[in-house]
Amino acid sequence: MTRYVSWLLWSDRGSVSAEMTVFVVPCMMVLAVFLIFCGRAASASIDVNAAAAAAARAAADAPTPAGAHTAAADAVTATTAGTAWTCAANTNTGAHHRGGKVTVSVSCVVPVSDLGLPGVGATKTVSATATEPIDTYRAGQ
């Protein structure tokens, strides 16, 4: 019986579990942070697309090209309010007439420094473009 007890005390049983803990836990943490980063990037892309669509709709409803620029900028500001993003809207009003179209490009700088990822810049630039037709039968023009 003493041989059995000494074999249990000096055996290598359980060493794989400790090694797996040392290697698997950091890998799982890195994977979790990566998934959070991917989710944040996808969410930012969706939000910037929504801002571009809202800006294009607002610009298409404006009566003049100058009003379209202002309406698009105001729509982007309203859509991204409450975020720490810096956004700029570029409005193409070359075809701003009845039956024409308005194209708005939105580019936002999204901070990702709070994730603490090494090798990833402190910001990520996300861009989107949306085109909206101008109603042929609208009043006021």
Image (spheres, helix red, strand yellow):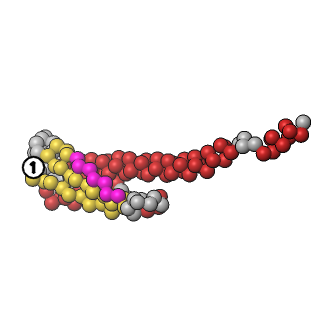
Q: Nearer the viewer, residue 138 or 29?
A: 29
Q: Which residues are magenta?
A: 124-130
Which element carries disc 1, helix, strand or loop? strand
Q: Nearer the viewer, residue 5 or 105?
A: 5
Q: Position of residue 34 (x, y in %)?
A: 46, 50
Q: Nearer the viewer, residue 97 or 109?
A: 109
User: Main structural element of the magenta stretch: helix, strand or loop?
Assistant: strand
Q: Which residue is mark 1?
A: 95
- Residue drawn at 42 percent across, 48 percent down: 38
Q: Is residue 69 visible?
A: yes
Query: Split into 4 quadrants, where in the image is the N terminus?
Result: top right
The amino acid marked with disc number 1 is Ala
- Residue drawn at 84 percent across, 43 percent down: 6
Q: Is residue 76 visible?
A: no
87 shown above or below 133: below
- Residue most toward the right? 1
Q: Position of residue 16 (x, y in %)?
A: 65, 43
- Residue drawn at 34 percent across, 49 percent down: 45
Q: Is residue 56 magenta?
A: no
- Residue drawn at 38 percent across, 62 percent down: 121
- Left or right of 24? Residue 101 is left
Q: Position of residue 71 (x, y in %)?
A: 23, 57
